[in-house]
Image (cartoon, helix red, strand yellow):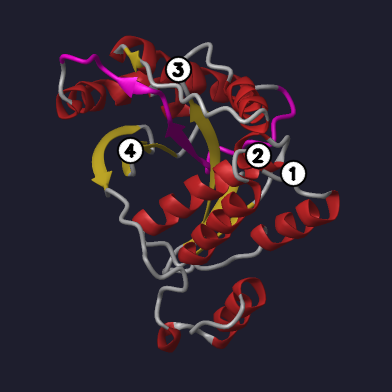
Amino acid sequence: MALLSKSASSAWRAILAEFMLPTHLKACVNCLHTLMADDFVTQNGDGRVGREGYVASAFAILTNALKVRLGDAPDCEVLTYDGEVLAYEISEAMEPGRARTREYADNKVRLAAGGSRVEKAEFISIEVACSSLREIAEKKVAKATKPGSAYQKTWGLLIYFNPGFVGDANESADSARSKVEARMADDVEIAKGYFSEVWVLWHERLYLLWKDGLRSSQILGPLVDEDDEYAPEDDDLSDEDREFRERIFGPGD
């Protein structure tokens, strides 16, 4: 595990702020994960960039965006094939009370002492899991309505729903997922009047729950991993994209 130096952190932030192909952003996130291991999640600031990079790349791939980049207010922007730039705020919803940074720090100590990793694997009730969606939606609305807020109503809200195992040991994963899907729009309804779109990314699926104040039932995905981090093929890349790819990842095979 390795924390990024300040210079490396600044360099990565500059890279991720450039518009790039969605698959290139995904490859950048994978590279950061390899470099940082658990610190990818916990390093102050850069763990956030890594998580937002994953969410933004998944969103861009599933919505068939042309390019994507990370930012700060808004957290990401996507360029559509129609030439439109759409802005999104990204938030993560986990089960209430989880101290993930402490979990990773404790594992770091165990591994350094020659021990083994302890993984958190607990079933979370549907009500408790979905309460985190409500909490995030309420927090983002509070931030959007705060005096001097930079948020704009043209921005969308993209929530990464990342609780533990939802349901219980006696219920199938499909059954639990169906119950959560049936209530997600209600759980984030408060945000419909403050964001142009409200999306949830969960289990590699992307749910558009609200658009322009109206309920939606669009589901995209699941996201399929690409074996080729340089996809699409070289022949499909512009000179600009090929140069960017080689600058970051080196020449392809």
Q: Which mark is residue 77?
A: none
Q: Which residue reaches farthest front?
A: 114
* Residue 224 is a magenta residue: no
* Left or right placement of residue 105 versus residue 3 in this view: left
Per the image, the residue denoted by label 2 is 39
Above or below, 74 against 176 in this view is below
Considering the numbered disc 2 on the image, is that residue within a helix, a strand or a loop? helix
Magenta-drawn segment: 147-170
Instruction: Say which label, 3 or 1, has the lower sequence index.
Output: 1
Per the image, the residue denoted by label 1 is 3
As shown in the figure, which amino acid type bears the numbered disc 2? Asp
C-alpha gap between disc 2 and disc 4: 22 Å
Instruction: Say which label, 2 or 4, has the lower sequence index.
Output: 2
Instruction: Say which label, 2 or 1, has the lower sequence index.
Output: 1
Q: Residue 150 is drawn in which quadrant?
A: top right
**Which percent across, then down, holds residue 152?**
60, 39
Residue depth check, mark 3 versus mark 1: number of the one nearer the observer: 1
**Which percent across, then down, holds residue 52?**
56, 44
